[in-house]
Image (cartoon, helix red, strand yellow):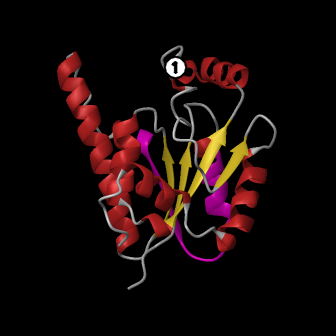
């Protein structure tokens, strides 16, 4: 059974990842894609108040489970659009360890700082300053297969660009290059 393709969208909160993912589900016409979003996994967690240490543990376990869910879905042939925020280096390292790098199209979703701050305030469902805090962190690794800027193109245009790029993914992929850089002891599957 062939593994599924993974379109992995990485960007700050309010950068437009979820909007691009929804558009990708509309425009990509070769396969059946599922949108897996880290926010959806976080929303499944218990609603009781958690102390700082308990919350940190729960968030780390949630994200690790999210990464493995992506891998499991793709392993059995499902095509996936991932919506994630790689604002801590361990998150990228974990994804590099559990996802087949040749299956991943790694897309950087960029947006100007002023615009993500404006969107965050307009949304009202995020802690103030979250996007600004993440702004420098999410793209630290510096390697993508493709990038989109949602302050210059709307979600539909970004999705169309990704769709057109998908059949022409570079080999080696950004995930392959990043795995070689950060996890050289893990052989390519």
Which quarter of the figure has residue 98?
A: bottom left
**Image point 35% across, 57% down: which residue?**
184
- Quadrant (top left, top right, bottom left, bottom right) of the C terminus: bottom left
Q: Is residue 26 left or right of residue 178?
A: right
Q: Is residue 22 left or right of residue 75?
A: right
Task: Please give the range of residues in magenta.
Answer: 19-39
Image spot of residue 166 (x, y percent): 65, 68
**Image point 63% across, 77% down: which residue?**
30
Q: Is residue 13 left or right of residue 157?
A: left
Q: Residue furthest top?
A: 128
Q: Residue furthest bottom?
A: 1
Compared with 10, 169 (above or below) is below
- Quadrant (top left, top right, bottom left, bottom right) of the N terminus: bottom left
Front one among 141 and 120: 141
Image spot of residue 100 (x, y percent): 40, 66
Front one among 98 and 9: 98
Residue 30 magenta-highlighted: yes
**Image point 67% across, 62% down: which residue?**
26
Compared with 48, 18 (above or below) is below
Image spot of residue 73 (x, y percent): 37, 66
Which quarter of the figure has residue 171?
A: bottom right
Image spot of residue 42 (x, y percent): 35, 37
Residue 77 magenta-highlighted: no
**Image point 72% across, 27% down: which residue?**
112
Q: Secondary structure at mark 1?
A: helix
Residue behind mark 1: 133
């Amino acid at each position: 059974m062939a593994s599924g393709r993974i379109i992995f969208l990485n960007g700050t909160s309010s950068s437009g990842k979820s909007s691009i993912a929804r558009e990708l589900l509309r425009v990509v016409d070769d396969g059946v894609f599922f949108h897996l979003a880290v926010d959806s996994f976080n929303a499944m967690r218990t609603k009781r108040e958690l102390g700082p240490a308990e919350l940190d543990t729960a968030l780390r376990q949630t994200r690790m489970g999210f990464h493995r869910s992506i891998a499991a879905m793709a392993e059995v042939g499902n095509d996936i659009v991932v919506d994630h925020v790689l604002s801590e280096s361990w998150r990228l390292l974990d994804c590099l360890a559990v996802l087949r790098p040749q299956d991943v199209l790694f897309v950087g979703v960029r947006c100007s700082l002023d615009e993500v701050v404006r969107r965050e305030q307009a949304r009202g469902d995020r802690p103030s300053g979250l996007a600004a805090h993440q702004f420098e962190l999410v793209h630290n690794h510096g390697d993508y297969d493709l990038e989109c800027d949602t302050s210059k193109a709307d979600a539909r245009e970004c999705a169309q660009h990704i769709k057109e790029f998908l059949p022409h993914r570079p080999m080696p992929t950004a995930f392959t290059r990043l795995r070689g850089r950060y996890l050289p002891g893990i052989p390519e599957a």
